[in-house]
Image (cartoon, rainbow, N blue to C red):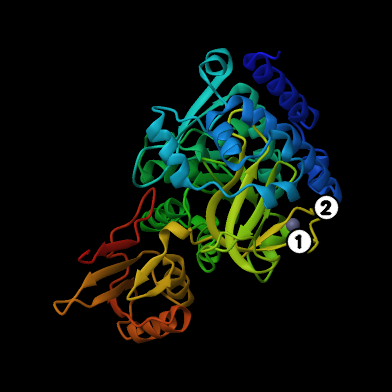
Amino acid sequence: MTHPTNRAEETRRAWHGVLEKYLEDRSTPLNAQYWSPMDTWSRDQIRAVQDEKIASVAPFLYENSDFYRRRFDGLGLAPTALKSVDDLIAKWPVITKQEMMEDAIAHPPFGTYTACGPDEWADRGWMHFSSSGSTGVPRVFRYTHFDRKFWEQANARALYSGGLRKGDTAFPMVGFGPHVFAWGVQYTLAAMNLPVIPGGGMDAKARAHIIERFKPTTLVCTPSYAFYLGGVMREMGLDPAASSVKWLVTGGEPFSGVAGTVEKLQDLWGAMSVEFYGCTEVSPHCGGYSCPEYQTGDENFIHLMEDIQVWETVDPDTLAPVAMGEKGITVCTNLNSESSPQLRFLVGDYTRLSDAPCACGRNHIKGMGCLTGRSDDLINLRGIKFFPVQIEEAVRAIKGTGDEFQIRLTTMDDGLDVMTVLVEHTDSAVADVVAKEIRSRCEIRCAVEVRAPNSLPKSEMKAKRVYDERNKG
Ligand SMILES: [Zn+2]
């Protein structure tokens, strides 16, 4: 008879074995174009490795996570029933944040949805992260030093694909809070042997002086902070576009890939934006990343790193898979961790997937239009649904609008909910133009108020764009 503890250990050893088979502990790139040979794997090679990992991770999760064991049992599925991507999509319903949150509430303080228990934490615990959900109980994710190596390599592939090379110096200006973005980049820069100028705990003017004096090539921050700092530099009589900065590694905010915003940010800094897309739950290291083609193409996109994760899109209402090229919301299966491998977690960003070959030589699937508009952010105004990013795109499409804008939702005395969009511009007549642009993109009528340039409050770390002051109920 097999003791459960032995099964837990056996399946963990087997899962470690599969993970390590594909671990490259690189501190230097493969060649001038690619960090890793996995970057140019064929789609067949990618699929074969995904299948191999799923067949190993399913029994591992069954034995090492009570959340998964309950789910397998509830579905009447043996852990050996999932041996491929096809099995997974056919037999395993998506996991929602709500489901994870309920587990966290029922089993405080860690929940049972990860496979990092007290023994692993004591033996090789690395970092304790927390989901950035705006409401409810925080979902916590503990990762081990075993995971760290996989995390660093995934991020290194992404940063190298984005353009970072030996000779670059990074200047991270991020709060090192319990969120994954800043830490992931920090550890990866060390693994890539790239130097860092620490930029925490100082104001924008001090940071501007550091850029002028010590000439870092790479800023690491949220997109809104890059706008803010650029604005502060201009007020100081400095031109960000003439600075040493060549790369903007942006993340930590859902607005990184908004059409118009990326271009505006790149123009402000005379630098290239290097996208970093992921989430704490299932893609704590980079899941989506830029390649050189993204920098020049007609439509923004990011690659999704498929040998370590399975990415799908599903219908937001039925959660049924949508066809390649159709718009849906993202689902990710993470196959790159001992602590938090997750099967079909509903990340919930709208995108269209494309498996068309990319001129950069990477065969990893692409999220077109980048991945913007998390389904949680959807605004419902009088039954018309739209995302803040659609308003942002409309505002950015009008020449001369400032960096800041606000969306205000209020209820009139007669009970009608209305939207007012505040923009910055020198010409108040631009209100009609913006309103028309919004109407054509979102099919919604709204009032537009024009304020003087630089009069709206500047957002520093994380932009607050939506002020919902409607009467509820
Ligand atoms: Zn590419």
For the C terminus, the quadrant is bottom left
Query: The residue tagged with tag 1: helix, strand or loop?
Result: loop
Q: Which residue is mark 2?
A: 43
Q: Position of residue 284 (x, y in %)?
A: 56, 39
Label ID, residue 316 = none
Left or right: 51 in relation to 175: right
Dot 2 or dot 1: first in sequence order is 2
Please say if 399 is above or below 13: below
**Residue 254 locus on image (x, y percent):** 48, 55
Q: Which residue is mark 1?
A: 355
The amino acid sitting under disc 2 is: Arg
Q: Residues within 10 Å of mark 2 (few under 14, many from 20)?
A: some
Q: Are marks 2 and 1 in contact (CB under 8 Å)?
A: yes
Which residue is found at the position 48% from the left and 33% from the top?
198
**In the image: residue 31, left or right of residue 378:** right
Q: Quadrant of residue 388?
A: bottom left
Q: Total label count?
A: 2
Quadrant of residue 199 in the image?
Answer: top left
